Amino acid sequence: MTSISISQLRVTAGSVPLLHDVSLEFGSGQWHTVVGPNGAGKTTLVEATAGVRRRSAGSIQIDGRDVASMSERERAQSLAFVPQHPVVPAGMTVRDYVGLGRTAYRGLLRGPSAKDRDIVAEVLDRVEITAFAERDVITLSGGERQRMVLARALAQHTMVVILDEPITGLDIRHQVDLLEVLRREVRECGITVVATLHDLTLAAQFADRMVLLADGAVQAEGVPHDVLHSPQLQSSYEVELQVVTVGGSDVVVPVSSAR
């Protein structure tokens, strides 16, 4: 069953087209990564898919229901969205911040139920941040903060998680650590992940499917190996790229024109 279906999506900013005629199927229980150069429309695509950016035309459906027809609460119970720069208010503990993911089930004015507390505790354990659950959020390192933000999304208990550049600003160890957590959620819990990533090599290593965007349109889509070896990759990035195999994985290397 298709988890997300996008048909003839068009998004504009005034008279400027950001996305045009985008049609995609994001299969249930798979990791889909959206790649492309700056300005390709990656953030616009995931924001529109999550229902936080208005579309000009087309449809976006989750299991047959149009996202635009959902109330904010219904949408929060169907998908979790992690923006590139999430707001993290000071003065909250990590546990309380993650607990915000349960708001869609109880409202803002009601305290957490026993079920809410159990879910938060379980998620903290799954992303391995239980040890600092009582710390103030502003004391966290970059990697710890990103895990906390992911934990809040997972606490929503949705089968779709959409993330915009979730590893921005992290060193390579923390990038891989966070992506490993996400991959485990896909494999063990069967969630559908749609994420944008700049790093083509990491995108290929973790994704089941890859979408290449450029100039607001889909240039290629398929298994990562096929997308990385497509002629559209070179033309989209307007730079010479070499794809080599290291340890059985595709590694993308830019080729400098300097000699």
Image (cartoon, helix red, strand yellow):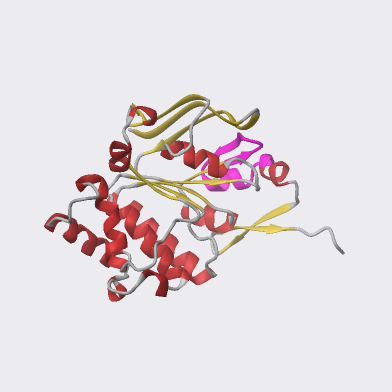
Bounds of the magenta segment:
212-232
Vertical placement of 42 versus 177: above or below? above
Q: Is residue 163 left or right of residue 1?
A: right
Residue, x 69% and y 41% (percent of image)?
Answer: 231
114 vs 164, left or right, is: left
User: Which is nearer the eye, 205 or 193?
Assistant: 193
Q: Quarter of the image holding residue 1?
A: top left
One can see residue 188 in this view: no
Return the residue nearer the eye: 139 or 242. Answer: 139
Horizontal and vertical percent position of residue 165: 51, 54
Farthest residue toward the right?
259
Would residue 6 be seen by someone viewing this image from the given angle? yes
**Residue 85 in the image, given as x and y percentages of width and height:** 49, 56
Q: Is residue 157 above or below residue 220?
A: below
Residue at x-position 54% and y-position 70%? 171
> Residue 241 placed where, x, y %?
71, 53
